[in-house]
Image (cartoon, rainbow, N blue to C red):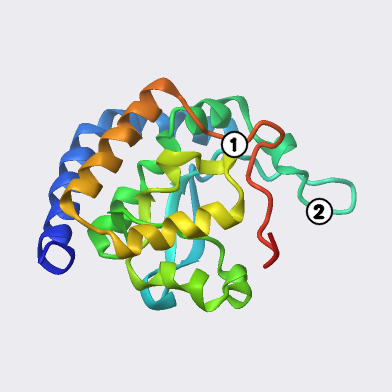
Amino acid sequence: MYKSLLKPLFDITFSLLGFFLAIPILLIASLLITLSNKGNPFFLQKRPGRKGIVFTIIKFKTMNDKKDSDGNLLSDEQRLTTIGSFIRRTSIDEIPQLINVLKGDMSLIGPRPLLVNYMHLYSDFQNRRHEVKPGITGWAQVNGRNAIDWETKFNMDVWYVDNITFITDIKILLKTLKKVLMREGINSENSKTIEPFDGKY
């Protein structure tokens, strides 16, 4: 009952509350990113959702579009701006995804939506993460985030799919708030973003 009826209500209620409370932050962040990047403050990207249906995720843009002499984008670390680094550390970049939740593309809590070009690499077990809506935060995010390996991440995603309850979601939500306030587990030690998934562990 919770998974099919109460969880969508949970998502809408807390997303609306969070969105209105975050309006001042959204406005300030939009202005600072626009000035820093000299352009659109939002990052839009196609991601797979429930049943693998692709949607457009909305996040704040933390990197600029600087390119090398051959016209190729510089590395993520080189393009990460000072403002972007702060916004990523504080998880402010995730706030616009509340719009995705209100649209029904995402849930507040669920497996994080990964890249579309990973989809053909998944095993049947790994693909089970698409049995539910992807989330802004999830079981893997509160248990290591970018610091855990891909095998552990997928195991945690599927564990969540099999163990969705109100208590579990509340636990994840509270752990997320703690990690955001303590700025825990934003990136792995040696990289600005997690290593790409190549279908192997």
Above-or-below relation of 59 to 48 = above
Can see residue 112? no
Q: Could you tell me which quadrant the C terminus lies in?
A: bottom right
Helix, strand, or loop for circle 1? helix
Question: 15 or 133: which is nearer to us?
Answer: 133
**Residue ID at (52%, 53%):** 153
Disc 2 residue type (three-letter): Asn
Q: In this view, does 150 lie to the left or right of 166?
A: right
Question: Which residue position is annotated with label 1?
Answer: 37
Residue 162, how many percent across, how many down?
31, 64
Q: Is residue 194 left or right of residue 153?
A: right
Q: Which image quarter: residue 29?
A: top left
- How many neighbours does mark 2 have within 10 angstroms: few (below 14), some (14-19), or many (20 or more)? few
- Cα separation, mark 2 vs mark 1, equals 17 Å
**Residue ID at (22%, 39%):** 18
Residue 46, how many percent across, how many down?
50, 65
In this view, the residue farthest toward the top is 182
Can see residue 150? yes
Question: Which residue position is annotated with label 2?
Answer: 72
**Residue ID at (36%, 73%):** 131
Q: Which image quarter: residue 94?
A: top left
Helix, strand, or loop for circle 2? loop
Residue 44, how many percent across, how many down?
49, 56
Disc 1 residue type (three-letter): Asn
